[in-house]
Amino acid sequence: MQQVEGIGLGLRQPLARELFAADLPALRWLEIHPENYLGRGGQYAHLLARARERWPLLTHGLTQGFGSLTPYDPGALAALASFVRELGSPWHSDHLCVASVDGVYLHDLLPVPFTARAIAHIVARVRVLSDALGVPIAVEPISYYAMPPGAPASYAFDEADKLSEILERADARLLLDVNNVYVNARNHGFDARAFIDRLPIARVVQLHVAGHQVRADGFRIDTHAEPVCEEVYALFEYTLRKLGRPVPVLLERDDRFPPFAELAAEVERLDRIYRAALPETHAERAGESLGA
Amino acid sequence: MELEEYARSLLPLCFPLERDAHLLPGFELYREMVRARLLAMARVAFRRSFALLGEPTGSASFARYLAATPPRTPIIRELMGEFATHLVRDGLALAQAPAHAADLVRFEAAKWRVASASESPLAPALGEVDFEGELMLNDSLELLPLEYSVAATNEDEAGRHDPHTLLVYRRRGEDGVHWYRAPRLLAQLFAWVRSEPLPLPLAELVRRLVAERVAERVVERVAERVVEREVERDPPPDEAQLLLEELASGLTVAVERGVVLGSRPLPGLTK
């Protein structure tokens, strides 16, 4: 299995020219959204081909949503399986959310209730996807702005606890988005570190770090369109030290792109935190560069 | 609330025409975010159309589209084709619009689709155009019949009534979207290549096309002369020569531009 670790970026068309021209040793891999590349020619096919030559790639889906009520399309699954296999992604990830209902796609990620029936449904969908793709699935809990009706006041920690059950029953991995945790914690009034402490950390295979928008009323929106804030950097370091092992870490920037130098600076800052938190990884990499 | 009931309550939330009494409290933000995301893409895909119709009209039409046909594809860029189909039929949006608005929508939709169109692998590489083989057209090619010159960059020119067929395509291996007007004969030929249920030799299609055109001109001239009571008239132009020139130059240009990729042998036949 391909070893992917360290800091990565999403392959986004507005960044592409500067990305391929940059000398950025801290950048170790790229994330690909299959929905943006499958069945698509022209510049997107070219971008993907060039990216494959230079970096390991991890696939991250946007539309399957493990709480969704739309049956998987066999043809679409086969195409996705072929795509994931061709890129050599060691796992595929998608979200713990409702993304579609009876064939209607919401084009957003909405929270799920954690009832026993819902959990059974989620587990089944994860398993079907894993079987179809032939690689493990990493499940990403989302940022949410409201809770499903009837959800307990302890919805957040309910999610953390139920996540363990879901991942165990589905034999799945965890993609932990640190910014999602922070946004949820600030919006819904719980302690972010306490939430992370309750997660099945042993199942984490990947981290996301991103920026968010702070509205005038203090409510936070997970936009992926702002720089990472200091609190999220701190939460990232906390998570990494708790994890204690190398993982791929995505700097997730999807909109309002800054000059590439600013993005590169964020990548490098994340890399410094990463190497400080995981000194053994740094020593191994130094050994690699010396040809040891 | 169980997952099924909750999830189905999200649909009228996300795609209503107006705020609904049974909106899930607290979920209004999702409605705004879903609409904003999709509308932002529509504004990019239909930049000139939105400018022509006006932003409020374009946005209102988009809201009607979402309410009437919520997205049935997980591929967000494919929604733009669905929206275009809705917009050209949206009487409310077009009632006060210039006559060429619908054509402009169709043109921008075609460019959007062509920009992302997939390219099928060709193995082995196609050879020269062979009239005994099947003519192979660029995968991305769209044949766009239009009433108005909407491909003109000058908006005054765009409103000129000028029926024609536009070829919109992307050269294999490249990124840019191109377009040009197809001679009538070529547009007909390409339409037949695309629509025939079984591959036919190019020669067969050309023979059919020429026969149809000549017959059409014969009928026109006979009708003219009968109406004018003309017993004699100067010899007509050599229709075959005209057709030859139009088709030969049209096909040559199409090859040079990458609209025609070459030919492949028909199944069961070898050279």
Image (cartoon, rainbow, N blue to C red):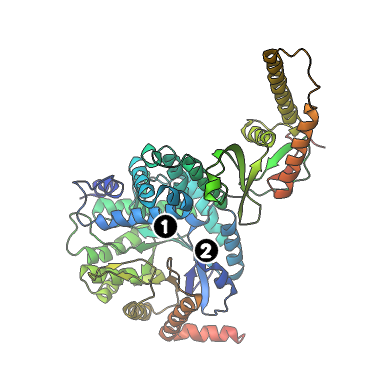
Q: Nearer the viewer, residue B75 or A286?
A: B75
Residue A62 percent location from the top left of the image: 42, 57
Q: Residue furthest right?
A: B271
In the displayed structure, does residue B121 sit left or right of residue B60?
right
Q: Where does the image place residue B202, in percent across and percent down from the top left?
A: 74, 33
Viewer-side label of 2, 1 = 2
Chain hosting mark 2: A
The amino acid pointed to by label 1 is Leu
Residue at 62 percent across and 43 percent down: it is B167
Residue A157 lies, in percent from the top left, at 23, 67
Dot 1 alpha-carbon crowd within 10 angstroms: few under 14, some 14 to 19, many 20 or more: some
Callout 2, which amino acid? Gln
Residue picked out by circle 2: A13
Residue tagged 1:
A62
In front of the other: A203 or A13: A13
Q: Depth check: give the residue in front, A67 or B200.
A: B200
Q: Identify the residue shown where x is 57% and y is 47%.
A: B151
Q: Position of residue B262 (x, y in %)?
A: 74, 44
Q: Sequence order check: which comes first, mark 2 or mark 1?
A: 2
Q: Quadrant of the C terminus of chain A?
A: bottom right
Kindly state the secondary structure of the residue where label 2 is placed. Answer: helix
Label 1 marks a residue whose chain is A
Does residue A274 lie above or below A86 as drawn? Answer: below
The reply to whether residue A199 is in sight is: no
Under tag 1, what secondary structure?
A: loop
Between the residue at mark 2 and the residue at mark 1, the CA separation in whole angstroms equals 17 Å
Q: Are marks 2 and 1 in contact (CB under 8 Å)?
A: no
